[in-house]
Amino acid sequence: MILLDGKKLNGEIADGLKKKIEESGIRPTLAIIQVGNVEESNAYIRHKKSYGERIGANVVHIVLASDIPETELINKINELNNDSGVNGIIVQLPISKHLDKNKVIESVSPMKDVDGLHSINAGKVFSDDLTGVTPATPKGVISLLKHYGIKIEGKRALVIGKSMLVGKPVAMLLLREGATVTIAHSKTENLKDVVKESDIVVVAVGKAGLITKEMVREGQVIVDVGTNSVEGEKTLEEIPTRKLVGDVAFDEVKDIVYAISPVPGGAGPMTVASLFENLVEVSLKK
Amino acid sequence: MILLDGKKLNGEIADGLKKKIEESGIRPTLAIIQVGNVEESNAYIRHKKSYGERIGANVVHIVLASDIPETELINKINELNNDSGVNGIIVQLPISKHLDKNKVIESVSPMKDVDGLHSINAGKVFSDDLTGVTPATPKGVISLLKHYGIKIEGKRALVIGKSMLVGKPVAMLLLREGATVTIAHSKTENLKDVVKESDIVVVAVGKAGLITKEMVREGQVIVDVGTNSVEGEKTLEEIPTRKLVGDVAFDEVKDIVYAISPVPGGAGPMTVASLFENLVEVSLKK
């Protein structure tokens, strides 16, 4: 089995970006807006800060109160949109429920939207217009496949999940690479058969244990974009711990398929790497 | 076999739109811009004019010289964008090669874009945002399926062709209706197997005879969006004629499948009906 090692590739991409930044003489700046203080977000932001440091980019971390009025948040984003010293802006999700997530995302300038979530960038993925910012997670999935020499053209690719964050844009990028693409979701009947007939399976549902050994076969390539916090082993003091798993029952599937990405260490680190690839790209475009 | 009769449904939709217009007291106006004088376009425009007349809408036909400079064409479109007496604007395709088709389409106000081709409307189809104008041809395909009581949710739907005009938006609309959707195209291997496993097949390639009797099975529903001009029978004077056919070898497929749309008389008239549905919708929104 080939492990699609996102963590390792994340490091190799960092080396490349570091070199690119040194050669360009431009030091890109990423602004991360955090609303409130969700512990999960803190961990993600730490990763992004350390990645930025590693490649020689500035990461500005802006923490706003969890009860900030929407107009105030949008004013802050506009300020960053207009600040020529800021190249990329991301709003760390999730944000407080009183805020309209779509409105907030749409207020980020499409040219600074290094997460690639703005509707203009999503629309460009749909229409195969290469002038936009490619959504970070989908971009990371494709980079991972390409890095490990997985042939996409002409293959049957299955995307499970039809979200705008992952499922739909991944499907469009796989289509761009020449795959025959199927999109499955909660209403799909006989998911097992649909999985079995596919050469490449990208799972982005958020349901631990969704893909079991009965559903897969030899020769398949699986990228697990799911993130689920489940109960881990108990400590010696019988205190239950939590651990992160994907949508695939990794341990039982890994010895059957040709290649698989782990969780953690697969799609997650690739998202961070792609985000900074986007940052460097938009910075050098200026 | 059930004939998915687009021509018949086109008429029923006309009756409904006529009533709607009468009741609203608003007489919608559609502007059709034609660049040059392509015979094929003339025929399409005649259909649209007569449909408009039938439902009680104004259709203004604007003919521009085939060598019109791009800026002049875009100025004309802007004029119509700003004319509150014009509710819908379509640019009849194809347009002369010296014009940038995308730029021209993007210059139509998204709110008057009753063909649903503007990137803002396409993007809304992608993100399932119902506030946009649904692209006319894809909308017509879904209306045809629904009218004949074809269940879409949970079914395996195949779209052959990945154009922005038909393939991709049809795939998104089928996904919205709950189908498991596969998108196939010129790089797809074993198209026959992919077709066989599908319950609903929408073909939009532009290749006469692409789908033959060997590829289909009982129970399938086929919508043929292809339009191909092929050699017809010779006249008594041995003069070859031309006729319009779809992508499906209709005569050999029709007795195997459960339902199929003909060409002509299927997706074509549905596009016209959907276009005027869009016109009425945007007119009443004002």
Image (cartoon, coloured by chain):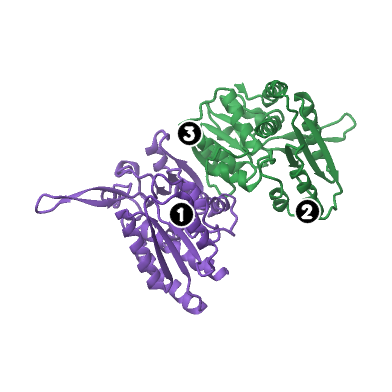
Chain colours: A green, B purple
Evaluate whether label 2 is on the same chain as label 1: no
Between A226 and A196, the one nearer to me in the picture: A226
Return the residue at label 2.
Answer: A97
Q: Amino acid at mark 2?
A: Lys
Q: Is residue B112 visible?
A: no
Please tell me how many numbered marks the rendered image carries. Answer: 3
Callout 1: residue from which chain? B
Between B217 and B238, the one nearer to me in the picture: B238
Is disc 1 placed on a helix, strand or loop? helix
Return the residue at label 3.
Answer: A178
Q: Amino acid at mark 3?
A: Gly
Q: Quadrant of the C terminus of chain B?
A: bottom right
Evaluate whether label 2 is on the same chain as label 3: yes
Q: Nearer the viewer, mark 1 or mark 3?
A: 1
Which of the numbered marks, if any, corresponds to residue B73?
Answer: 1
Horizontal and vertical percent position of residue B256 = 31, 50
Question: Given contact means CB atoms under 8 Å apart, are the residues at marks 2 and 3 in contact?
Answer: no
